[in-house]
Image: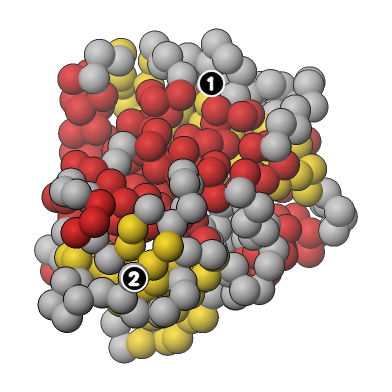
Amino acid sequence: MSGQRVEERAPVAGELAHLGAAEIAGLLTPAGAAGAVAAALREGLDPEGPRACPPRTALAAPGGELLLMPAASGRFAGVKIAGVAPANPGRGLPRITGGYLLLGGATLLPLALLDGPALTTLRTPAVSALAIDRLAAPDAARLVLFGAGPQAYGHLQAALAVRELTRVTVVARTPEAVDRLVAHARTLGVEAHGGTPDAVRGADLVVCCTTAREPLFDGRLVADGATVVAVGSHEPAARETDSALVRRAAVYVESRAAALREAGDLLIPLGEGAIGPDHVTGTLADLVAGAAPPEGRPRLFKSVGMAWEDLAVAAALYLARPGPVEQRDIVR
């Protein structure tokens, strides 16, 4: 999605690249993926544009929900098919399943098949890292992290990529999961402990990456100037933050249309009359373009996850594969 102009050539039969979870983890850091997302926005991608990112399609399935997320932008197109299976963790299986098919933009010929959960685990923290870098105070050092699953690990790495954290407080339902994440954070050189939701009172940065359907903490406790990132849901009836925080905060989203279609964190306060339809302060594109958040208020970034972000990161991963460029399915 970024760099010099790319011209496609037709892929040779059998050259479809396969990027598994281990390869994806080794090709791009959250900071590198954040750079790909920022580059897509700087190059003029419009998250509100239906061609770049139509609404997510959701289909009820016996095991949960099937999501279809296509996007197209210039040199590349792609589609993610993701399954959300809530009962899977009890079976020892991942909650999120699926894959991503990357296509050439001009020919629509397949270029690569990527592990869908690994792409999502990289993409979501990358988007959050970009928002944190633009919204959080430069000296933000105290993180409260809600959740202890794969996204929590990814968000810890993403936050460390853009801020020098000195203390991490982990809040999650399962003590054993909290202990594992705390131990991992300590290996990264950060003081880390388990805690309770009221720890947000002393936080510079709060990150929510859970499956919660109700608010995780009292939004009145969040300090003015603190930054909250909520990524856990994309359903109108589910939220991680409460109306008190949303009403106080300068709110940023990936896309106003997507947020007002899917984000319960905003739709529920809107339904309550706590906020109006114009409450959103700005978008991720505004922040990348240099817009400064207002002072004296909490900053809230609510992410629902969008297909253009998957496309930006999938394309960056494809271009980052080792080997001579001329052996790939595109040439510079």
Give left or right: position of 124 versus 253.
Answer: left
Q: Give the residue drawn at x 67%, y 59%.
A: 46
- Identify the residue at image location x=35%, y=32%: 156
**x and y, in percent, of residue 42 in the image:** 62, 44
Q: How is the image coloured?
A: secondary structure
Q: Can residue 196 be seen by looking at this rendering? A: no
Q: Secondary structure at mark 2?
A: loop
What's the mark number on residue 9?
Answer: 2
Looking at the picture, does residue 322 appear above or below residue 138? below
Classify 307 as above or below 83: above
Residue at x 38% of width, y 67% of height? 8
Residue at position x 58%, y 69% in the image: 53
Residue depth check, mark 2 versus mark 1: number of the one nearer the observer: 2
Answer with mark 2 or mark 1, whichever residue precedes in sequence. Answer: 2
Query: Residue 254's spot in the image, x, y percent?
Result: 63, 52
Going by the numbered disc 1, the residue's amino acid type is Ala
Residue 20 visible in this rendered orientation of the protein:
yes
Quadrant housing residue 294: top right
Mark 1, residue position: 203
Please, what secondary structure does the residue beneath circle 1 have? Answer: loop
Alpha-carbon neighbours of circle 2 within 10 Å: few (<14), some, or many (≥20)? some
Neighbours of disc 1 within 10 Å: few (<14), some (14-19), many (20+): many
Residue type (three-letter) at the residue carrying disc 2: Arg
Image-based side of 226 in relation to 123, left or right: right
The percent coordinates of residue 106 (x first, y second) are: 47, 75
When asked about the image quadrant of residue 267, the answer is bottom right
Instruction: Give the camera-side residue of 331 and 283.
Output: 331
| Residue in the foreground of this view, choosing between 10 and 33 | 10
- Image quadrant in which you'd find residue 271: bottom right
**Number of numbered markers:** 2
CA distance for labels 2 and 1:
50 Å
**64 is higher (above) or lower (below) than 280:** below
